[in-house]
Amino acid sequence: MSDVRTRLEATTGDALLVTRRRAAQDRGLLVGTAVLLLATLVLTLAVPRLVERTADLAVRETIQAAGRDADLVTHPVMDPLTLEPPDPRDGGYEAATWLESTLGADTHEPVAQVVAAVGVLSTPVGEFGASLVHVGTPGQDEPVVRWVAGTPPVPVPAAEHMATRQDHDLVRRVEVGLSAAAAAELGITLADGPLTGERIGPGRTDHVVVTGLYEPVDPQAAIWQEHAGLLAAVTARPGMPVPVHVAAYVPYENVPDMLHLTGRRAVTISARAAVDTEGMSVADAHRLVDRVEQLSAQTGRLSTRLPEVVTAFDTRMSAARAQASLVLTGVAATAALCLVLAASLLVGRRRELVVAERARGASIASVAFRGLLESVPVVVVVAALAAGLVGWWLPGHASPVLLAVVVVLVAALAPAVLAAGVAASATSGRRTPADRRDRAAQRARLGARRLVVEGLVVALAVAAVVSLTGRGLLPLASGEVDPLLSAAPVLLAAAAALVVVRVSPAVVRAAGRGAVRSRGLAAPLAVARAHGATTAVVPLLAVTVAVALVVLCGTLVHSVRTGQQAAATQLVGAHVRIDGPLGTYGSEDLVDRLAASAGVTASATGAQISKRSFGENTFLKATLLVVDAAELAEVRRAVGLPDLPGLATLGEPGPDGTVPALVGAELLERAHLDGTGVVVGAVDAEVLLDVRGTTDLPPDPGAPRLDARAVSTGGGGDSADDDGVVVVDRRVLAAVADQRPSVDRLWLAGPGAVAAVEAADIAPPATSGLVVTTRDGWHRAWSQSPLPEAMVALLLSAVGVLAALSVLALVLVVVATARERGRTLSALRTLGLDARTARWATLGELAPLVLGGLLGGAGIGLGLPALLGGALGLQQLTAEPGAATVATTWWPVAAAVAALAVALVVAVLTEQAVRRRDRLGEVLRVGER
């Protein structure tokens, strides 16, 4: 026990006094190290929280962009005794009340709706399509409309109802209201009294009587969002024999009249509620999805695509978290290496003191204890300060602490470990064998140990790359990212640094053979100094990791930006595309006017029909894409899309009774057909195809989405379950088989396409049914959404931080080796060494470090994205159909070169500042310093 106490006292005695004195002497370096540690910890703790805050913003935007798909819809339940549907007048309100009571905390106020389509009405002002709609909210007391003309609709007298039930030849009627905007478009004034619209039904005539015109009290209220026809006339759907359609408002008291006129089976009853995204977090979204799925499974009355939307978002967010972790790991590793260099500088300043202590009998444990006593309190205070700053700045989000813990351990242990190493090497007691063979065996053992360590690093790097390629950058079940995967760039950079360390001596020796033949002292001195720097692993590793991450982040930024532009071109397919009922009377004129507009160089129309039978008894389904083939080929060329072989020739007639077509290669192969006698289902009959080749054209996605599903579905569309694509020309199909699908998409190309569409002043989708998408507009909206914009900002910020760390690493190396280099330069100054040659000595010492780090880091930074390909999850940021393309560019390498050039300049200036007080007289008097 006394022996343990004695050893403890020997280890800790006077440690506090010695530590305090040494800390006061090197307080500048300690403060600088603390600032570096504080900045590193703030980054490692704050960036994950910023990513999660961005995730909250992104999930809200995703749900909002999904629109009606994310709404919650419920229907009334059957009466369990009679198995009859509930009273339609109250069923919708019952469904709305249930929705509000179960999910009201997460939704806006639900809207009850009762809808019946009545088809075409014949009126004194012409024919138009109409539907009868009642909308309202539970507990609604105030009127939702303001009557501005005519009189409010009233219920049909009960006696009249009884009469029509007994005499089926009598006319059934319902009184309704019409919006003033729709009435103005249709030319309805009610100046001469109510307007009667007739509907010819099976064996009878029904009357829809417009008694009043109204304006909505709140046009932005949720009750109007589902039925735009209640506010204005809208474009009729394809197949309707009239150009416009309106929705007539049926008051609650008149709903029985609507049922009497249309029949209960023709009425749709439901309630709809939009998700309230105000203040929603990712956890809130998941909780809501779980609740929705549970209710849907238990009751069967709830339907929504919200789970699909959130699942797509989760996939996208997983890639973003992993990419952020990959970048943050590189930054933390570089900063940790800089902390090691700073600790090495600190220990180097105290080397003589540590050696003297060891010579006087101090144990290695006591030396390490003094190092820990100095570093641990500083690290603890800095860590607490960083945690407090991040908690105050970004409250409410937890962040992974693994990286922060690693950095803290490095900062706390590095000074103690390095000091213990100096003490151990001072009096190690190791003896050099006198026999050459023994010395060779000793060197071989040391070389074998070093080779094992280097092999382990290389094996870890290879394992990380193989794992990354096979599994991708996806979080674990806990939400954390696999450390091996996120550390892949650091491990690869470490492997590259070890290769550079192995190769550098040979390169320096080769340079030395040319340097000895040069005039002057600069070149031989630079090469001589370079020989001593070829085995500095930590500085080289710091520079290599920094350069690798700079090039990697720059390459990812360039790939994301170019990929987003490519996605916009592929998804939109033109400078402008319009989706919707373009085959109606008014829309046909719109198509012709847009095609003839100035600046529109090419235009093409088309339609897509999914779930078409392909072949005979093959049970395969095809997506039939009916387009203006030659015009579509011209549009694709105008926007830079690759040519599709054979597309422009589909307009040429084929053999009698056949329609020329391009078919997906996989579809043909699965059908075991050779291209002759192929049958495909068209609109309402089968046609015989003349297959003129294969195509890799995917199904047209329609109007590209802006929510996360754009990545998984290529922008939208309902053809994901089909087995392949069949492309035919619209005019040939109409001429040969009299198959005329309604046109529902238009592509416009040319410098004036956007201006032409803007000049056409197309009504919003809610009223016109037409969705206008410009290539530049989609790209702008997608690239500026929270997640892609935040990730690009993070990558660019990482480039700046890593460049600064590379400068810091070189400065620390120069300062740490200043004393040793100063001895040589001081001796040479007595022989006439000038300042210029001294600078060359510094540059020569840094040359292997800078060039090796640049070559190794640039190789890793450029090769890693190309090697991993889709495993980086770039498609989640670009939305490219298929795999994302990794695009290399010059500027990341130029940024790394510029950062190292600045670092060299700063290092040389630092060297001059360190040596500026040296006086030749002191060197001559004192000797080497």
Image (tube, rainbow, N blue to C red):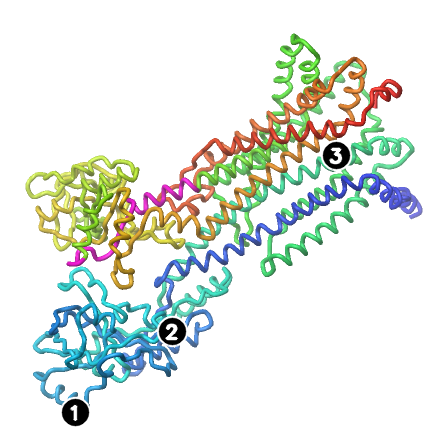
Q: Is residue 38 above or below residue 181?
A: above
Magenta residue span: 561-586
Q: What type is the residue that disc 2 sits on?
A: Pro
- Image check: 122 left or right of 725? left
The residue where tag 3 is placed is 344
Instruction: Locate residue 428: give its quadrant.
Output: top right
User: Observer-nearest residue: 866 or 135?
Assistant: 135
Disc 1 and disc 2: Cα gap in Å?
Answer: 35 Å
Name which of mark 2 and mark 3 comes first in the sequence.
2
Name which of mark 1 and mark 3 comes first in the sequence.
1
Q: Can the viewer see residue 68?
A: yes
Q: Can the viewer see residue 618?
A: no
Is residue 577 magenta-colored? yes
Residue that appears at 70% across and 53% down: 385
Name which of mark 1 and mark 2 comes first in the sequence.
2
Secondary structure type for disc 1: helix
Residue 925 at what x, y percent from top left? 89, 19
Q: Seen from this angle, which residue lies furthest left?
A: 656
Q: What type is the residue that disc 3 sits on?
A: Ser
Residue 487 at what x, y percent from top left? 57, 40
Q: In the rendering, which numbered label is found on residue 666?
A: none
Q: Is residue 82 above or below residue 817?
A: below
Q: In the rendering, which numbered label is found on residue 159?
A: 1
Secondary structure type for disc 3: helix
Instruction: Locate residue 766: give its quadrant.
Output: bottom left
- Image check: 410 left or right of 599? right
